[in-house]
Image (cartoon, rainbow, N blue to C red):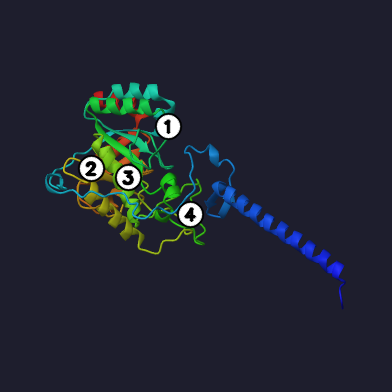
Amino acid sequence: MNIPYRHRRVLNSLGTVLLVLLLVLIVVWMCWVVWLQRYVVYTDDGAMLDFKQSAYEMSGKEAVEPKAQQNISIFYNEGADAIDTSNEMEQINGYYITSKMFQEDYDNVMLQIERLKAGTAVMIDMKGDYGSFYYASTLPEAVQSASTNIPQVAKLIERLHSKGFYTIAKISAFRDYNFGLNNVPSGLYMLNRAGLWSDNGGYYWLDPSNPTTTSWITSVVLELKSMGFDEVLLDNFRFPSSDKYIFNGDKPATLASAAQTLMSTCGSNDFVLSFCVEDPMFSLPEGRCRMYLTGVGAGNIAQNAALTMFEEKETRLVFLSETADTRYDQYSVLRNLYVAEEVEARKAG
């Protein structure tokens, strides 16, 4: 079948126009996909779009592979500052201050600490699960909390030190959205490798076996140590409870190895590095450290203590309690600051 020349020209012109339109649509689609990437959130059920991302505390950045040789330096203790296990720790009995307390009830927090005696152990949140810092960190990748009055926290820390308290800084270790977002290879991936896995709260978790992860935690601990804190507690020192992320190693052994690495880089004879864990059978590293347990009812204290695999339980095992229940007192305990009045009145009586 012969197609007239004029008809062939019309068909060729039409084909050219359609091809151009197709190319334009492809370019527009690619631009649209790139723009949408900032709103992609990974959850247990897969990826979803969340157009409220801009309302998060941090000023977000697209997750990218780190530059070559972009590692955080690790400093190993030597000589006089090496770990000294002969320097005994004492049993602690004190209080903790959450970020919500100093964000929403700062004046009452200051009032409560003025009533405490010198030497009291006081723990304060310094870095939350989202990865936001509640103090003016000088670390390059630190993201300050937008909901926190940083100067007020600085005054609070100064007062804790000036009153002669035993000060403990609490930071989230492996649950860290900010660092995971900007250091993707250090996080735990979804099973389909589409991106980092996040828990039901939308938080990314870091891989405890990744050297960048332990380097980052080391830098935060050393900064807080230089600020005069007597102890740093690594909260969320565990793997998340889920089977929807990739990790093929031995989890207990990996956590134990990470703890030993952090102790070797941060520990010293006048500083305590501690771990808040889920399993009381967690293997503590050698050195000046403690195990913290949270959510343990007063009736289950002895049962959990019996499962621990270290000596000096009264000194090295710490319970975090919301109440003034006296059954915790046989071990180290930190209670909610809001029950301090009741506890201190009982001590005075």
Question: Mark 4 or 1 closer to N-term?
Answer: 1
Q: Disc 2 and disc 1: Cα gap in Å?
A: 25 Å
The disc placed on residue 234 is 3
Q: Disc 3 and disc 1: Cα gap in Å?
A: 18 Å
Q: Give coordinates of residue 169: x percent, y percent.
A: 30, 37
Name the residue that disc number 1 marks: 100
Q: Disc 3 and disc 2: Cα gap in Å?
A: 11 Å
The disc placed on residue 197 is 4
Does residue 14 sit above or below 80 in this rendering?
Answer: below
Give neighbour class at mark 3: few <14, some 14-19, many 20+ (Cα, 10 Å).
many
Q: Disc 4 and disc 3: Cα gap in Å?
A: 21 Å
Question: Mark 4 or 3 closer to N-term?
Answer: 4
Give neighbour class at mark 2: few <14, some 14-19, many 20+ (Cα, 10 Å).
many
Residue at 12%, 46% in the rendered image: 86
Q: Is residue 55 left or right of residue 90?
A: right
Q: Give coordinates of residue 38: x percent, y percent.
A: 54, 47
Does residue 275 sit above or below 46 in this rendering?
Answer: above
SS label for mark 1? helix
Q: What amino acid type should be assigned to the residue bearing mark 3?
A: Leu
Name the residue that disc number 2 marks: 272
SS label for mark 3? strand
